[in-house]
Image (tube, helix red, strand yellow):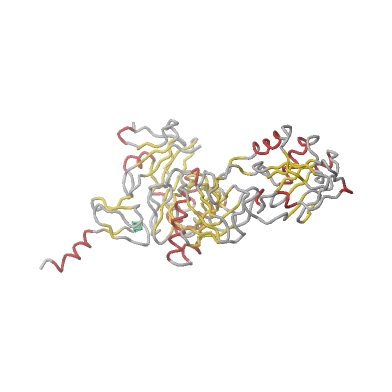
Amino acid sequence: MTAPDAPKRQREEKIRCDACPVMCYIAEGKAGACDRYANEGGKIVRCDPLTVLDRRIAAGDEVKPFLISDWDGQIVGGDDLFVSGIGSGTTYPDYKPAPFIVSRQIDGVDFVTVVTEAIFSYCGAKVKIDTDRHLGEETARVRSEGEVIGHVTTGEYGSQMLSLGGVDHLTGGSKAEGRATCDALMRLCNAEAVELTIDGGAEVRVQAGAAPVVDGHAEERMRVGCGSATIGMFASQWQGLVDEVVVVDDHITGVVSEHQAGKVLGWPDTGIRIQGRRSTPGRYFQVAHPGRGWGGTDIEDPLSILKDWNPKKGARPGLTLLMVSTTGEQWGYYVLDEDLVPRAADLPDTLRPSVDLIAENCEPALCTVMFQAGAGGSLRSGVTRNPVRLTRSVQALKTRVTCGGVPAYVWPGGGITLMVDVSRMPERSFGYVPTPALVAPLEFTLSRADYQALGGHDAKIRSVEDILAHGGEYGAAVRAVKPKP
Ligand code: SF4
């Protein structure tokens, strides 16, 4: 007669995690669907330790367990120790105070830091990729594992930008799209390498803090500036060494003899004629199509952007021409023949330093991942009984918002829409829940007087020392991390 009861008993041995809407039933010794919570001896615990940022950790010793036995129990003053949201647990389902509400004295003033791990259904990443190479048309779809997770947005100065994630990709598409978006965002925010493909464009490997890899080519340099800016910077160094210089750039190609910089230096006309649309003297738009060739164009032969030379405006046999890209990666030296056709020639030693100088003035090409999320929702109840007061306090700059101890930029206007550079956050700060949504550390710091004024959970305030000694609802494990510079 035992068989019919077995499933019921099995279910009874499991306990429910209520740290997100999935509400997993977790068996003893097992973890829930997100691997962030487990059943340990009949109690739901957080699998990762609470992370404290400890400025006292010596350089070269970036992470260490915070052992209570090592700690002399001394009160830790000022900014030396900061209890971050990483590993703290969550306020979800948002009827209760945040996992830790920490009191600290800084320069004689009582401060409170409200610490939680926020579940963000409204979140995404803005990705800056330092490259001139054309990654895809503006608004082209960006995919991970075949699913659309975002799009190409406006190009910036020397960088291509992607807008990834957001609530529409997390919740507004298919289940597979939501999962792929959540997975790609988490890996990007944890500074892992993620392969992205752009419809009608390139394949890019993106990793926060690392060089982008575009169609298998590891980018080294971020351009020195647009073609016009490059002319401005180096015109005086070319004077007297060459008759004409063209800096090839998909956005603004510069021509020194026509450019204002050349004019003020008294540079003579050369009769050069360029394809594309002339904006102002010596500055040309649309000399070719966007691509992965010279200066973010689709050309491999720079001469293809030149029209016939005009002898009435100074073109003559023997005239010398330097063509160079905005990174100094590509260059060519030419001499006009008797028919005023440019013929390739060896770059004179005198010009070599100017090409090298362009390359030297380029910064290393990197990927930057900014996590962007809305923290103006129900998690505010973990801070105060009157949520809008927290929003107002943040907007009035009385409450400082950090993610894993890193100051977040909060957008002006309504709500608490924050943005933070993930490469400054401690390693593996981000997690997920299968709803799908990202989980990220979040801390609100304000003076104790302001905290009381906004109706905070004053009775739940604890000292750092008490938290280190006794932990919280989800366990007592603590690790100490040296904050990144
Ligand atoms: S997915 Fe994770 S947080 Fe959500 S209920 Fe399951 S174990 Fe808890």
> Can residue 53 be seen here?
yes
Q: Is residue 207 left or right of residue 251?
A: left
Q: Nearer the viewer, residue 391 or 245?
A: 245
Residue 446: x, y in percent?
A: 49, 46
> Can residue 389 be seen here?
no
The tally of labels here is 0
Residue 43: x, y in percent?
A: 26, 52
State the residue lying farthest toward the front.
338
Q: Nearer the viewer, residue 383 or 281?
A: 281
Residue 420: x, y in percent?
A: 52, 48
Q: Residue at x 45, y 59 (%)?
A: 180
Q: Residue at x 50, y 35 (%)?
A: 107
Q: Is residue 257 left or right of residue 363?
A: right
State the residue lying farthest toward the left.
1
Q: Residue at x 40, y 62 (%)?
A: 435
Q: Is residue 392 left or right of residue 442?
A: right
State the residue lying farthest toward the right.
312
Q: Is residue 342 left or right of residue 188?
A: right
Query: Compared to 57, does 113 lie above or below?
Result: below
Q: Residue at x 63, y 56 (%)?
A: 154
Q: Quadrant of ligand 1?
A: bottom left
Residue 2: x, y in percent?
A: 12, 66
Location of the N terminus (image quadrant): bottom left
Which quarter of the picture shows residue 364? Answer: top right
